[in-house]
Image: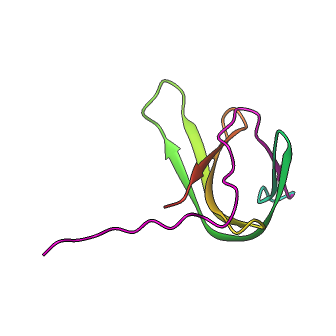
Amino acid sequence: MVLEYVFAEPSYSPIPFTDDLAVHVTRAGDPVALVTPGAHYEIVSIHNRWRVDDLRFLRARSFVYFTVELDSGETVTLSHDCTDDSWEIRRSS
């Protein structure tokens, strides 16, 4: 049996990975918008949220992850480092 994979092109422009990512949040800390150089994306829904407390390093680090759907139709995972209040974006598979 031969498996064949077909990859469809997305119907949106993927968000570029950038160090210039700003995330707007509610008072509760939930993300509501992403801002990259030249683009603004509203978060239409949060599909999943989880927290990881990492105690392996000299100082404890806490991360909160969000799988979100953007107004562009793209689903991404946001990572919030609570220790230094930084954000990263990852494509969801």
Q: Which quadrant would the N terminus be assigned to in this image? A: bottom left
Q: Quadrant of residue 85?
A: top right
Above or below: residue 6 compared with residue 54: below
Q: Residue at x 54, y 27 (%)?
A: 59
Does residue 64 belong to the magenta stretch? no
Q: Tell me which secondary structure the magenta stretch mostly adopts.
A: loop
Colour mapping: rainbow
When asked about the image quadrant of residue 46, the answer is: bottom right
21 with respect to 67 (left or right): right
Q: Which residue is drawn at 83% across and 38% down?
A: 37
Q: Residue furthest left?
A: 1
Residue at 76 percent across and 60 percent down: it is: 30
**Where are the magenta residues, as a range?**
1-26
For residue 23: magenta? yes
Compared across the picture, whether 26 is left or right of 80 comes to: right
The answer to whether 8 appears left or right of 79 in the picture is: left
